[in-house]
Amino acid sequence: MELKQRGELEEYIQDFDILWNKAEASEKQALVIFLGGLETDIKNTVKMFEPKTLRHVYNLSRLQSNTQTYRKSPGYVRRPASVFQHHPVQTTTTCPPQATTNTTNPHTAPQKPTPTPWTNNPGSNYTKTYTKPTKSIRNQDFEDRRLKGLCFWCDNKFVPGH
């Protein structure tokens, strides 16, 4: 069974399904053969997710193909490589350092404040531990909740910002 993607992905998927139905190959074999015929850009991204079923491979391939199409569109603007921007955390200390000024000579610049060393002691107001709630959920329960639109942590309907 030899087939290569030469045009649109959907056409390749349809042609592959026709050949697979005629061939005597397991789904795992078909998965390897399908990936081998994909365009390199799509194949590499799909393989990264280590799909186990042909359906998963088809869906990942479609997502990557759509991403490539979008990136080639005239309205696409490439964002900087760094998605995460560093925002310095502002903290206050229990005793803010006081700037000392030289009152005797008005032409002398004020002296810089002496920084207060930070200590991580248990009694500090600045030690905050946040633990995310954990809950064991079976795959079937997970899928049922997702299909019903329920929150995974409680029994309420899930809405953005919940």
Image (cartoon, rainbow, N blue to C red):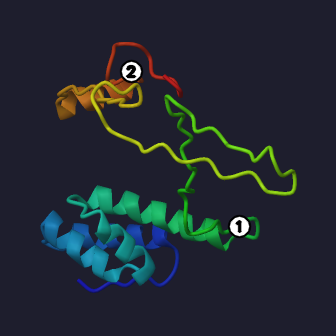
Asked if residue 18 lies left or right of residue 138, the reply is: right
2 vs 1, front mark: 1
- Outermost residue to the front: 104
Tell me if I can see residue 15 in this picture.
no
On the image, numbered disc 1 is attached to which residue? 77
Q: Residue at x 13, y 72 (%)?
A: 24
Q: Where is residue 75 in the image (x, y as percent from the top left)?
A: 76, 65
Amino acid of disc 2: Leu
Q: Residue at x 33, y 16 (%)?
A: 154
Q: Where is residue 67 in the image (x, y as percent from the top left)?
A: 55, 65
Q: In which quarter of the image is residue 50?
A: bottom left
Q: Which residue is drawn at 31% across and 24% down?
A: 123
Q: Quadrant of the N terminus?
A: bottom left
Asked if residue 128 lies left or right of residue 91, the reply is: left
Q: Where is residue 2 in the image (x, y as percent from the top left)?
A: 27, 86
Which of 105/61 is in front? 105
Number of disc labels: 2
Vertical placement of 45 versus 98: above or below? below
Q: What element carries label 2?
A: loop
Q: Residue at x 55, y 48 (%)?
A: 114
Tell me the tag on residue 150. Answer: 2
Which of 43/3 is in front? 43
Which of 83/34 is in front? 83
Structural distance between the alpha carbons of marks 2 and 1: 35 Å
